[in-house]
Amino acid sequence: MSSLMELEHLVQAEITQRWEEGCDITEVEQKFHALKEKSRAGLEGLLGELEGLSPKVSFPYVEPSILGEIRAVRPPGPRKMKVNLPDEELYDRIYGAWLGRCAGCLLGKPVEGWSREKIEGYLKLAGAYPLQNYLPPIPRVPEEYPIHRGGERCMLGNIQQMVRDDDTDYTILGLHILEEHGLDFTTDHVAEEWLTHFPYKQVYTAERAAYKNLVNDIHPPASAVYRNPYREWIGAQIRADIWGYVTPGMPERGAEFAFRDASLSHMKNGIYGEMFVSAMLSAAFVTNDIEKIVEVGLSEIPEGSRLAEAIRDSMKWSREFADWREAWSRVMENYGHYHRVHTINNAAIVLLGLIYGRENYEKGITISVMGGLDTDCNGATTGSILGATLGAKALPEKWVSPLNDRIESFVLGFNNSRISDLAKRTFKIAKEVLEGG
C-alpha cells in the first residue's frame, strides 16, 4: 500500500472514529468525498480538521481518559475485597487463569475475524456444532472457510503447545514489566518494554500506531491519539489479564495498573475495556458469582460510557433470553456497527460467554468463540476469567493437556516458556501486592 493510500485509509478510519466519539463529521466527510484527486496536502488538511473536532453537546456519554476523571464518574464499588485463599489455592487460581487464557485463545484462533454464521457453517460441515472441543480440521476445506494464518496448529489433533499469539504475548510482557520496574511502573516503562522486547511487525492496529509514534519521539499520552484511529479497538482489552492476576481482591488497583498500560495506545472506551477486564479478574479470585464479577468490573469504568451501556444491555438481554443466540442477536442489532475488532462489541460477546457459561469453562469459551468477531481474543478473555474462578485443577483435561505446559512467544527471552513457571512468577508478585495491602 502506497503512503498516499495509507493516508487516505487513515482519514476514512478517523472519520468513523470521530463519528463514534460523538463528533459532527458531516462537513469533513463531504469534503473527503468531494476530493476529485486525493492529494497528500488535501488529506493532511482533513486530518487536521478531524483532530480539532469535539463531541457534540447532545452526545449523551461521559468518557474521560484521565484516571482521576474516570474515577470521578464510576459507580460505587468494593475497590478492595477480602481474599481468603491459602497460597496453594491462590497459585492454582493464577495457573488456572494462565491455562484458561491459552486454551480459549487456541480455540478461537483458527476462525479469528469470522462471523457467527460462518463459524456455524464450518462446524456443521465438520459435524462439530455446537462446539465441544478444539476446532476439527476438514480435509480439503472449502475456499469459503480459509483458516486464519497459523490456525492449523490450533486445531484438534494438531496442538503441541500454546502457539505464539499477541493475546498471550502481552500477558507475558506485562509480567516482565512488573519484574523489571516493580509495582510503581509507569506508562513510559511500558513504552520502553515495547521498544526493547517486542517486534514492531507483531503488533497491530492501535499498538502499531502507538509504536510508530514512540519511534518518532511522540510520547504518551500523545502516542495514543496521534494518527491512531484505532484507539478504542480491542488491543488494550487483550492486555488486561496480568494486572488482574497480580491484584487478587483489589479491583481498583488492578484497574489502575490497566490504565497505566492502556493509556500508551488507547483512549476512552479503549482504556475502559482493559480496566473492566482487569477488575473482573481481580474479583474472580474472591467470588465465583459471575454477575458479581461483572458488576465489580463495571464499578471501575465510567457509568455513562458506551462500554458500560453495552455491558448493562447485554446483561439485561441475557436475563430475557434462555438461548445465548437470541441475546447475541440483540447485541449485534445495537452494537454490530462497530468494527469487528472494536472493544465494545467484543466485550459484549465475552459477557455472553461468561453469563451463559456460568461456572462451566467449556460452555463459556465455546459460546465466546461461536459468537464470532475477534474470536481468539474473546475466547482468551473468557477463559482467563473462568480459569481464575475455577483454578487449574478444575479445568477439563481435554482443554489443558494439549498445551503440554508450553507457550511460544515473540517477547524477547520468553519463547518456549513453561506456563506453570509464568504462573509461579505471577504468584510471587501477587503475594507482594497482597502483603503490601
Image (cartoon, grey):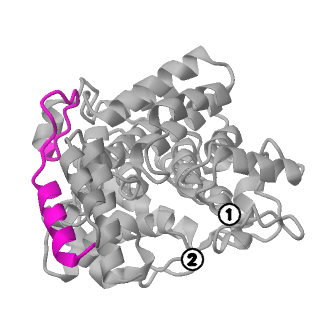
Separation (CA) of disc 2 from disc 1 = 17 Å
- Above or below — where is 117 with respect to 143? above
Total numbered labels placed on residues in the image:
2
Left or right, 45 with reference to 233: left
Side (left or right) of 7 relative to 156:
left
Which of the 4 image quarters holds residue 219?
Answer: bottom left
- Location of the N terminus (image quadrant): bottom left
Bounds of the magenta segment: 38-67
User: Which residue position holds label 2?
Assistant: 408
30 in magenta: no
Name which quarter of the figure residue 186 lies in: bottom left
Residue topped by disc 1: 110
Q: Amino acid at mark 2?
A: Glu
**Where residue 52 sits in the image (x, y, percent)?**
9, 53
Q: Amino acid at mark 1?
A: Pro
- Does residue 62 show up magenta in the picture? yes
Q: Is residue 186 visible?
A: no
Rendered residue at 87%/52% (across/down): 125
Q: x%, y% of residue 425?
A: 43, 66
Q: Is residue 330 visible?
A: yes
The quadrant holding residue 113 is: bottom right
Q: Residue at x 49, y 45 (%)?
A: 346
Residue 374 image position (x, y, % from top left)? 54, 54
